[in-house]
Amino acid sequence: MAVKIRLARGGSKKKPFYRIVAADVRAPRDGKFLEKLGTFNPLIEENRINLNQERVQYWLSTGAEATDRVHKILAELKILEPKKRTEQTKQHLPKKKAQERMAEKAAAEAEAKAAAEEAKKAAEAEAEAPTADEFSTEDKPAAE
């Protein structure tokens, strides 16, 4: 018998409330379950998740698999390791012309940044260099 740790929905329309249950994979979502492990209330900020961690550990040790959402909840509670996110396909990237425009913009920003740094260095060097007035007062002998 394959067991999953999953969410069973309760609550009324537009006010969801979930029980975290261990259930047979063939059972309906809100139907028969083996054991209630906790609750999850997405509508509140504090104490959203109440969980019997010992029983969750037991079911995981017996081979029960957590569904994606329950796995995410258990990862937040540091019971399970977070799932590795696979790299997305190229569909999420902008089209070719937009990428070219972005590259041009980045190059222009880099040039502007380099020019600003160069101007800053030149200003610092100019500030450190002695002026002509300093040379003229130091070089003249004192008038007696």
Image (cartoon, rainbow, N blue to C red):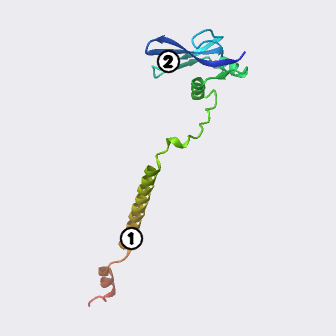
Toward the front, the furthest residue is 96
The kind of residue on which mark 2 rests is Asn
Residue 30 locus on image (x, y percent): 57, 11
**Residue drawn 26% across and 89% down?**
143
Look at mark 1 in the image and give the residue it sits on: 122
Residue 108 locus on image (x, y percent): 40, 59
Q: Residue 52 or 130: which is nearer the viewer?
A: 52
**Is 114 placed above or below 143 here?**
above
**Residue drawn 30% across and 88% down?**
140
Q: Residue 82 or 122: which is nearer the viewer?
A: 82
Toward the top, the furthest residue is 32
Q: Quadrant of residue 113?
A: bottom left
On screen, residue 118 versus residue 29, left or right, reads: left
Toward the left, the furthest residue is 144
Residue 63 locus on image (x, y percent): 72, 21
Indicate the quadrant containing the N terminus: top left, top right, bottom left or bottom right. Answer: top right
The kind of residue on which mark 1 rests is Ala
Give the Cα distance between marks 2 and 1: 61 Å
**Residue drawn 37% across and 76% down?**
129
Look at mark 2 in the image and give the residue it sits on: 41
Residue 118 locus on image (x, y percent): 41, 67
Foreground label between 2 and 1: 2
- For marks 2 and 1 on the same chain, the one whose residue lies earlier in the sequence: 2
**Residue drawn 47% across and 50% down?**
96
Q: How many numbered discs sit on the rendered protein?
A: 2
- Secondary structure of residue under mark 2: loop
On screen, residue 65 versus residue 44, left or right, reads: right
On screen, residue 127 versus residue 29, left or right, reads: left
